[in-house]
Structures are given as C-alpha cells and as structure tokens.
Amino acid sequence: MIQKKVCMLGAFAVGKSSLVRRFVDNIYSDVYTTTIGVRIDKKIVNIGDETLSLVLWDVHGEDSYQNVLSAYIRGMAGYLLVVDPTRPHSVDNATNLKNLIDTEIGPKPFVVVMNKCDLKEQWLITQDDLPDWANDAELIIEASSKNDTDVNLVFQTLAESLLQNRQAQ
Amino acid sequence: MRTITNNIFSKPANEPNAELVNEWNTLRSLLLSEEQATIDSIRDDLTALRERINNPEQRIQDISDVLSEATVLSQSSNGDLSSALRPVLEAQFSISARENPELMAEALFPILGPAIRKMIASLFKFDASGSSKIYSIEQLFVIDKETGIPLVHVVHEDAFAQDADMVSGMLSAIQSYVQEAFSTASFDGLNTLELGELSVWIEWGPNAVLASVIRGIAPESFRRSLQERLEIIHQQYSQELRDYDGDSEPFDPLKIELTKFIHNNHTKSIVKLSKLTKKQLVCSCAAIVALIALVTGFIYSEVDENRWQTYISQLKDTPGIIVTGESRGFGQYHIEGLLDPMAVDPIVLLKHSSLQSAEVSYQFEPYHALHSAFIVKRARSMLAPPETTLLTLQGSTLVIEGLVTSEWLKETRRFAPLIAGIESVQYISTLSTRKFSQ
C-alpha cells in the first residue's frame, strides 16, 4: 500500500477540519491538536487496483501557528487549499500559503476547495475571482462538509493525482 | 688478437667478394645469433615500455595498481607519501563537508555512532548490565524523517497499539513544533517522552527515526541498542530510504528483525501484563496518548511562559510604562502598573507577541513619566507654541527656539515650571543670539 502525506491548508475557520471529519474513518482526540496546531488523521482510498493511504495533516489556520507551518508542510506529497467564499480574505491567505509552499518545498499537486457551497447565496466571490495560481490546481471544487457535497471527490481527485505523479516518476 | 680478428672479418677494400660476404654472414649468425635474439627481445620490450609510458590511461592503471601498497609501505617507513597527501586530503574533506554537509553526515552516520560510543566507553564506566531494571518494549516504529510516515511498525502481541500512522505523525509534528518553538537550529530531535511507567524513546538518523514505546525503566544501554539498530537500518536500507516515495514494501524484511528485537527485550516480569484485561490494555493505550498530550501541554506551557516573560520585559523597557505586578495562569494573564498617557499602548505591543490579546487584562494607574521626550511632548501640548518653534529639554530647562510672540513667551515662562520635569525656560531667538532666561 502506498502512503502519502497530505496537508489541509487554509485560513482560520474555512472548514478544513469539517472536511476531514466528513472524510476520515476515525476521529481522534483533539486534546493535543489545540496545543501544537495540527491534527493527524488518515483515510484509505481505492483507485482502480491501487490502494492509497492518505495521512492527513490538518494544519490550524490561526496566525499563532504560522511560524511552525514550514515545518509541518515538509515531506507532503500534495495538499488541499481551502477557501471560504463568504470571506474573500481567505483567498489572500490561500495565496500566501501557495507562495510559501512553492518557496519552501517547490510546487506540489493541489486541489482548491471552495467550501461552504451550502451557503452559496452568501458567497462574495466565484471561481472566476480566484487568482491566477488557481489555474495550476488539479481541480477547483465547490464542496460542503455540512451537506456532504463532493467531499469525497475532493480527496479522490488529489489521491488520483498523487498516484499519477508517482507512476510518471 | 686484434690482428687476427681483423684478418678474418675485414672485407677487402677494393674487391668485394660475394662468396666471402656470405661466409661472413653465416659466421656472424653462428657466432652472434643468441646475442641478436636478446637484442631483438630488448628492443621489443623497450617499444612496449615506451608505448605504455606514452599512454596516460595505462599510466593511471599502473599507478593505481601499486598506490595502495606504496602508501602502506610509505606509512611503515618514512611516511613521506602520507605527509604529502595529508594537506590535499584535508582540503578536499573540508570542501566536501562545507558544500554538502548532509551527504557527509549521511555517509558518516553508520560509523560515527559506534566511534563516539567507543570513545565515551573508554572515558566512563557504564552500568551496562541493566539487570536490575525491569522493562518491556511494546512497540517499535521506523519512521521516514521527511514525511513522518511509518515505514515499519512492530507491536508485541501482549501490547495494544494505536494507529501507527497517527502516532508517527504526532511524533513528527511534536518534533517540528518543539524545534520551531525554541528556535534552535542545532536541535537534533526529541529523545524521550515520559509518563509514569510508559515512555517513548526516539533516536534520529539522517533519513529515518526509530521510536520505541517502553513499559518500565529501561537501562541506558538499551538506548545504545536502539542507536546501533538505527545505524544498521541506515546501512542496510540506505538506498531504499533515499528513494522512499510512499511504498513501504521494501522495508518488510525489517519487520522480522524488529519483531525479534522486541521479543528479545520483552522481560519475563513484564510478560505478566499479558494477563491484563482488554479494558486495562485500552487504558494503557489511552495512557500513551495522554502521555504525549501531557508532554506537549508542558512544552506549550514552557513556550507560553517564555512569550509572557518576553512581553513583560518589553513593557518594562518601554518608556512611560511601569509594571508593578503580573500573573499568569490557565490561559489568563494580568498586568498591574502605572501608565503615562503618552506611552505606547500595551495592547499594540501585545499584538507583536504571540499572546492572544483577549486573554490579557490590564490595571494601569495614570502617571506622568519624566522622560525628556514625554516632558517636551507634554509641554508642546499644554503651551501650544507656534508650529515653527522648536522645544527641547536640557536637564530641567525647557529650551525654546524660533519666532514667538512676547505675550506667549511671558505666559510660557509663568506656566512651564508647573509642568512636571520643567524648572526653568530658556529662549533662543532665531533673529539674534540674545538669550532670555528666567
């Protein structure tokens, strides 16, 4: 079985942890995560004949954890960049994160998640408003952890991309 | 003798005789054939030698064949060659170490550990027996250093294990957090997490980490066993570790070795634990998680205390702020003191620290600080001089420079000494150097 480290990245309260909760099999204690700013879960994904174990690093979006962020993204194979379209500022945060990743560890496959599509009437931006870097994404997906809209698609898309990358190497 | 020889071998000068020449040749071949063959052989050898010397590749090959023996010989005799090579080797070693330290560290890792242990062992006497200690290895993790993903996870059949991916990830995250929190570039990894009779011992290598969950008190010699085991792993799997891309299959043989290692370190006294109920085992497992949570909590507390003390020091160093008391507990912070209205707002300073502003409460009493900058600022505010006027403070004298009205100057001389920190006024006109002083 192939194992890959995947990071969940995005501003504070964009819904990263909710996406993970919808997706993973097990929920572990939150005690330590509030201390060190990251929570680790995993999910087994089947793609064709291949089985992939995604080790998910759900990195907190608060400013106080920004210093340690560089260390947390080290060794990741890909990532989900989550934005909250009801808060356009979260896109600026995503831009900073994307730049940090490209600088620190080089470009990696990623999926952009426009979360909270259950609140679409409150969205202040659309896909067209995303910056140019979003064109590099494997996919831009409108999802909702509340309604379970396309949550699996988000992870499945990234997993397929990671597998393709591995086979290409 | 010479006369006879000349008579026999010399050819008549004016009359060449073919028959005589033939006879001469026959005689020569009879007499000199052996020497001629030797000369031919020498000529061939010389040609071959010349070709060998003129061929650089061949020369390299020839030298390499004898270099090692020559070095050994030189070392055992006068050591000239060793002395000649030393500066070159030292310079090259230094360049390699500087330009590619990771490669050097990786190459040296398997030999450096044993060398250091040997040196320390020669300096100190260890209690290597550890016989009085009772301990049991319940789990072993070999973790990819870069990703934090477990390459191998082995659990003793009597132990209860958490999800290996989660535990490995947590250890990796804690390591990253601690390193960042204390900002120490030379930090070479967490080595021990402890709670009661459970502990996690961690050894760090260039590419992999070996973590061991231990019940009981293990002797220090066990840490050396772990170090040696990790060095062997780096020797045997150096290529696989470098090429790791998420597939742990190449490390499967290691599982058998580590299982043996666990069994060899599972003491009989601890085996009794296998009779524990499932509930007790679950409790043990929860204790491991609690252990890690507690340790991280402690680390956070230490980091938080550092941040708090840094903030307090910053306040104390700020003109116009006097801290008379401070307290910290359970995420709540309190500061008491004196605050000049003209001082920098403590909340502004707080924003530059990593503390949450909502968690800090202040109780500041107003006061007037006697810093010269504050006195001048206060004087400007109260005396309202023309904008072009320059106010400075020399000792306790307020110095006024620029054009002012005589009425304003008169009022200023009367009121300025009422401002804390000002005892007299000195006026310097820009039109003349006349000075008026009170």
Image (cartoon, helix red, strand yellow):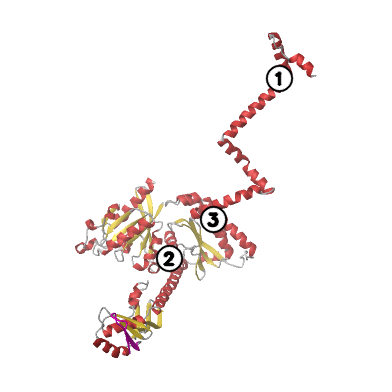
Report x, y in % for residue B431: 28, 80
Magenta part of the chain: B422-438
Q: Nearer the viewer, residue A35 or B340?
A: B340
Quarter of the image that includes the C terminus of chain B = bottom left
Question: Callout 1 environment at 10 Å: few (<14), some (14 to 19), or many (20+)?
Answer: few
Residue B340 seen:
no
Which residue is label 1 attached to? B33
Label 3 element class:
helix
**Whole-number angstrom distance, CA of label 1 to CA of label 2:** 89 Å
Residue at horizontal 64 percent and vertical 62 percent from the top: B122
Which residue is label 3 attached to? B109
Q: Is residue B112 above or below residue B3?
A: below
Label 1 element class:
helix
Q: Determine whether, in the image, residue B21 is placed left or right of residue B243.
A: right
Q: Is residue A142 above or below residue B81?
A: below
Report x, y in % for residue A110: 32, 54
Furthest residue toward left: A121
Residue B76 falls inside the magenta stretch: no
- Does the CB distance between marks 2 and 3 fall below 8 Å? no
Which residue is label 2 attached to? B180
